[in-house]
Amino acid sequence: MNITIDSGSGFCFGVEKAIEVAEQELSDSGHLYSLGQIVHNEEEISRLSSKGMETINHSYLKKASRTKVLIRAHGEPPETYKIAKDNNLKIIDATCPIVIKLQKRVKRAFDEMEKVGGQVAIFGKKNHPEVVGLAGQTGYMAIILENIEDARNMNFEKPLRLFSQTTKSLQQYEELVSFFRDKYEEQNNSGDFIHYNTVCRLVSGRADDLKEFCSNNDIIIFVSGKNSSNGKYLYNICKLANDKSYHVSSPAELVKEWFNDVQSVGISGATSTPEWLMEKVADKIRKISLH
Ligand code: SF4
């Protein structure tokens, strides 16, 4: 049986940088608080926990003082920085540079829209940390759209600036854009609608290569945490390209029967899936194929 790990998979540079920063701190001091899970991958979190990383939530942050707290690649809203300042916390900021840029654009658009009675909308998952960080730039006035249904009751007479969470599906975002374009054209005010393509290229740019990888293998094992947004998006691409695609978060979830009469297995993962975990999945498949 031929087993190949997708060369385009593994951590994106935003997550890689956050983990590097965390590992550096952990080797210097043996302990670090991470505000929220550093990556949506339980296996990687337990690896870092064994080195002294502790995941805390926002209620804990309010009570903490005089310690170091890591902000992960997803970023945080402005009030987190204020709490940190008030509580004498040292922030280790590992927000992805792409997310920082997006936060600034959302803030600029909101300031502009406020002057003209317009609105800012973000296509994303309501409680996703990146979306909370983006909405925080607008004092939580931005409209969060999970799908086109959420957009139907909006006021199309008001100017609109539209953004996307970085890890959403580019295709779904384009569908939403075309929905708004039609609505604004119907009102003869198409100039009032401006959208920004803020889906991260490291997620959307993988689609074509991933499709090819999936069709070149008999079955696909896609490895990612069940909460990972880009994991869900990329797995859907796998499933469409090869219906023998299976989603697992660890080697323990592999099922022996999937590998009956299979010649080639492709292993791929999300931007939050560590390389070592895909290697472990490959080892387990090798063992399965020997029995
Ligand atoms: S997916 Fe893109 S925007 Fe998100 S953390 Fe990775 S590099 Fe940054």
Image: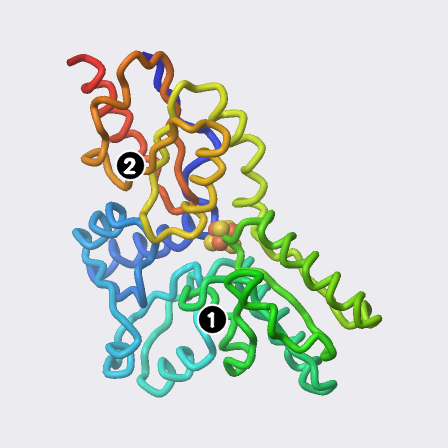
Percent across and percent down for residue 165 are 53, 60
- In three-dimensional space, the C-alpha distance between marks 1 and 2, rounded to whole angstroms, equals 29 Å
Of the numbered discs 1 and 2, the one sitting upstream in the chain is 1
- Residue tagged 2: 277
Q: From this view, report whether residue 147 is shown above or below residue 83.
A: above
Percent across and percent down for residue 6 are 44, 28
SS class, disc 1 = helix
- Name which residue lies at 79% across and 67% down: 186
- Name which residue lies at 63% across and 58% down: 176
The answer to whether residue 39 is left or right of residue 138 is left
Q: From this view, report whether residue 110 is shown above or below residue 19.
A: below
Ligand 1 within 8 Å, label 2 CB: no
- Name which residue lies at 44% across and 34% down: 239
**Label 1, residues with CA under 10 Å away: few <14, some 14-19, many ≥20:** many
Rendered-image quadrant of the N terminus: top left
- Name which residue lies at 39% across and 61% down: 72
The answer to whether residue 118 is left or right of residue 273 is right
Q: Which amino acid does label 1 sit on?
A: Gly
- The image quarter in which residue 29 lies: bottom left
